[in-house]
Every structure is written in C-alpha cells, then in structure tokens.
Image (cartoon, rainbow, N blue to C red):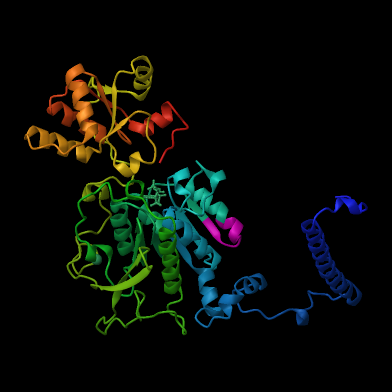
Amino acid sequence: MDFNKDSSIQTKAELEQIQASIAELKQKESILKARLASANSLIENQFDLSETLLQPTLPPGLTSNDISRYSRHLLLPAVGIEGQTKLKKAKVLVIGVGGLGSSALLYLSSMGIGEIGIVDFDSVDKSNLHRQIIHNEARQNMSKAKSAMLSINLLNSSTKVSPILEHLNSSNALQIFKNYDIILDATDNLPTRYLINDACVLLGKPLVYGSALRLDGQLVVYNYNGGPCYRCLFPKPPKFDPKQNCSEAGVLGVVPGIIGCLQALQAVKIILSSHPSTLNSNNTVSSSSSNTSPNTNKYYMTTFSAFAVPQFKSIQIRGRQPSCEVCGDNPNIKHLIDYPAFCGASQSDDPVMLKVLDEKDPFRISCTNFAKLRVSNPNHILLDVREKSQYDICSLRESIHIPFSDLQALVQADSSQDSIPTFSNFTQILEKSKTYNTPIYCICRRGNLSQLAVVTLRNYGLENCYQIDGGLTEWQKSIDPLFPSY
Ligand SMILES: Nc1ncnc2c1ncn2[C@@H]1O[C@H](COP(=O)(O)OP(=O)(O)OP(=O)(O)O)[C@@H](O)[C@H]1O
Ligand SMILES: [Zn+2]
C-alpha cells in the first residue's frame, strides 16, 4: 500500500488495520530499545560471568534451562526440585505410537522425563491422523517411532529418545525392557498385552496399561506396589473378536488422547512416588507398605466414557492372586511364551483374512478382471454386503446393498418358506439371477464377508455368483486410488 496517497486508503477497515500495524511496530520498538539498553550496560560494566561470585547456585541435577522450562512444576509442591530431578533421571518405555502413545509421549517429554524408548513397527497412515496427534500429514508412510522422535525433538530437545522400529515379541521384549524403569502399554492387541504383562512381571517393572475403543477408555497400573498383574485379572484370554479394534469398530479421536494423558500421569506419579509431598492418592498408585505388614493397598481400574456427560469412574479391582500363572506364589510361566498361540490371535490388529473359498476357486475374481468386465458386460449385479455404516461412507456406483447379516436372514426365511420381509433389493436380485441367470458379483471391505456371501447364495441355489478378491481395499489400490480408503 502506498502511504503517500491518501486516496489509496479506501475503507475504515483498512485504516484500522494500519493503526494496528503501527501499534505493533511501536511495541516491538520498545522491546528492542530495552534489549539494547541491557546489552549496553553489560558492555559498559564488562561483567566477567565466569566469576564464581556472579554465578547462581542451582540445585544439583538441574540446569538454568531446566529451571526456566519446568518452573511451573518447581513451584508445585507435589513435584518441586526433588521431583523434577527424578523425572529427569527416569527412563520410560512406550510400546505403540498410536492414539494412546501419541498423547502419552508428548506429555512424558514435555514434563521432563529424561529418557524415552519408543517401540513400533508400523508406519503413519492417513487414517491414523484423526487421533495420533504426534504424527502429521507430511509424515505419512514414515515409521511411527521415527515420526514420534521428530515431534519430541521439536517439543523438548533435552529428552533422549530411542526409536525402536521393531515388532515387540517374545525374543526381543526382555532385552528392550531391561533398560527402562516403567513400561507403558499403548498397543492394540491381546497377544502383545499378555507379552508386555509377563515381561514386566519377570523383570519386576511397573506397567501402565491403557486401552480405547469407540467412546470408552480404560486405565490400570499393573505389577506395582504389591498389586495385581494383568493375568491376575484375566487369567485366560477372551475369545478373539476381530471386531474389537479401532479399524473395525472405530474410535472417537480424543478418547485415546485422554487415556494416553492418564498413562503419562500414572507414570509420573510412580516416578514421584517416594516424594515427601507425593501425588499418591488412594488411586491405583497407592501408599507403599513394608514387606512384612500385610498388603492393605487398594487397586483400581479407571474407566472413561465420552458418551453424554463425560465420566470417569474408578472401580476397585482384585489384588495379586497367589494362583496367578506368572506373578503368583508358584508361577508356571518363568519365560516368555508363544503369545499368538496362547491367545489364538495374531500379534497385530491387522485384519484377519478368511479363506472360505479356495484360492484357486474359479468363482473368485480379481478387482482388475472385475473392472474390465464392469465395462464390457454391464449386465451383472454388484452386491455390496458391508454393514450399512460402511456402505454409507462410500460405494461403487449402481451396487445393490444387502448387509451380510440381512442376506443370511433373508435366505433362511425364504428357504424355510417363512414370509420374506419386503426387501426390494433381495427380490430384485432373486428375480434377475433366477430368471435371467444374471451373474452376481459380491463385494465387501476386504474380501472376507463377500466369500461368506457367495457360499450363502450358492447354498441357496444361485450358482452364478462370484467373489471380488480383496474387496474395496484392493479396488482402491489397484483400480481407483481416489476411491476413499478407510
Ligand atoms: N507387538 C507390537 N510391537 C510394536 N508395536 C505394536 C505391537 N502391537 C501393536 N503395536 C502398535 O501399537 C499401535 C496401536 O495404535 P492404535 O491402536 O491407535 O491403532 P493403529 O494400528 O495405529 O490404527 P488402526 O487400528 O486404526 O489401523 C500401532 O501403531 C501398532 O503398530
Ligand atoms: Zn498376576
């Protein structure tokens, strides 16, 4: 803008903007003048700052930078100098940099934990970013452990970070754990949960466990202060349910963030636990008792629900069980075992791939072949058998939607000659396929439900039925990169 031409200032808004800029410049000018004055005084007085008497007395273990940085902690009696020094010396291991690990790591570092190890084998995916706030758009496909390290370096360059780009398993867990004081379980699958628990018991390390799904989260401190381990509460793994993970059931972005913060809180409380003005309450981290007196501590699981009025609840859980296989009086588990076999589930939440149809089944068709056929022979039925919530996210044009569970019910009702509820999609398919032998191509998210759908339809007598291999996930990869992946 040309300030010499009054006519160029056309509106009141422009005038106000110029006045604000002038005020800002004046403020900057006064700051710079003050700095100049103090620099001049230093030069004039020629202070030799290496002179002992001019140097401050700092508490042992903390630098001048630490004092400025953690001043709000130092002012807090529950932390103070002693507590902050303990945090600086502490070594915490976080396994998993997903939704839980993201917030836990940022807070552990910002609060001044001296050394942090990060274990994760996975890389950043776009679908992670709604909750995994330690990563960002530019880091897609980068290893999660490395991305977390870069964020921590920006947040607090004095945190020593060791990224461990490995899949935690029975052969590397003890070796990795032994370098750390406290372990945070921020993973998402059952075998890894038992593995981490057993490794913590075998090495005598406290375990801060968190989990989050949909609108709910949970937090427990295990193997601490004479308390129970995960196996004391859950001696046998529950039946594996592939729907109980974020990629199937979904999760509200902020929920794992909240639980991750609580994990960081409990880790910090454990580190500060012998502090005179301790943060300990009657929560999971309970008052320490001597070895000789009976353990009267109480132990808690904290749950969080984001539904309606957000609610935290702390429920008392049972203490250490003398019969526990790993931490009991006569433990059977003295070494790490085969956890995927123990849990009957894989040690990742990678989707389960069903093999209901033989790999060479002629009624399996690849996405590429289906794409060709779709153009060359439009006279077919594309049957999408995903749940409604998924179908509504995105679908292929002119597909007919019948969720697999409905399809099963409809086929059953028709076979037993019950009256079929009016379901125009189903009637439409039956008419076309039975009368004109129009081929049906079944599609789903990954190619599992569609196999079951083909079997169901074939058993029902519709022979001209095909399954599209890999489903819409494969369609996105090999045919249409713009088809939304989810
Ligand atoms: N055994 C293991 N070793 C190392 N990292 C693990 C192990 N098991 C799980 N993890 C990591 O724990 C993290 C858990 O993150 P989160 O539950 O937010 O889900 P996600 O796998 O990132 O995403 P989504 O489930 O939506 O695909 C993941 O980054 C995963 O790679
Ligand atoms: Zn136990």
Left or right: where 147 falls relative to 473: right
Number of callouts: 0
Left or right: where 200 falls relative to 271: left
The quarter of the picture where residue 461 lies is: top left
Q: Is residue 158 magenta?
A: yes
Q: Residue at x 25, y 52 (%)?
A: 337
The reply to whether residue 355 is visible in this rendering is: no
Seen as rendered, the residue at the extreme right is 4
Q: Residue at x 47, y 56 (%)?
A: 102
The reply to whether residue 21 is visible in this rendering is: yes
Q: Residue at x 25, y 38 (%)?
A: 403
Above or below, 430 relative to 350: above
Q: Residue 184 location in percent, x, y?
A: 40, 61
Q: Residue 157 location in percent, x, y?
A: 61, 60
Residue bounds of the magenta highlight: 152-161
Quadrant containing the C terminus is: top left
Above or below, 449 relative to 316: above
The quarter of the picture where residue 262 lies is: bottom left
Name the one closer to the observer, 33 or 435.
435
Left or right: where 19 falls relative to 309: right
Left or right: where 139 falls relative to 314: right
Q: Is residue 133 magenta?
A: no
Q: Residue 241 location in percent, x, y?
A: 24, 49
The quarter of the picture where residue 326 lies is: bottom left
Name the one closer to the observer, 92 or 212.
212
Seen as rendered, the residue at the extreme left is 416
Name the one closer to the observer, 223 or 54.
223
Name the one closer to the observer, 94 or 289.
94
Q: Residue 119 location in percent, x, y?
A: 43, 52
Seen as rendered, the residue at the extreme top is 376
Q: Residue at x 27, y 63 (%)?
A: 230
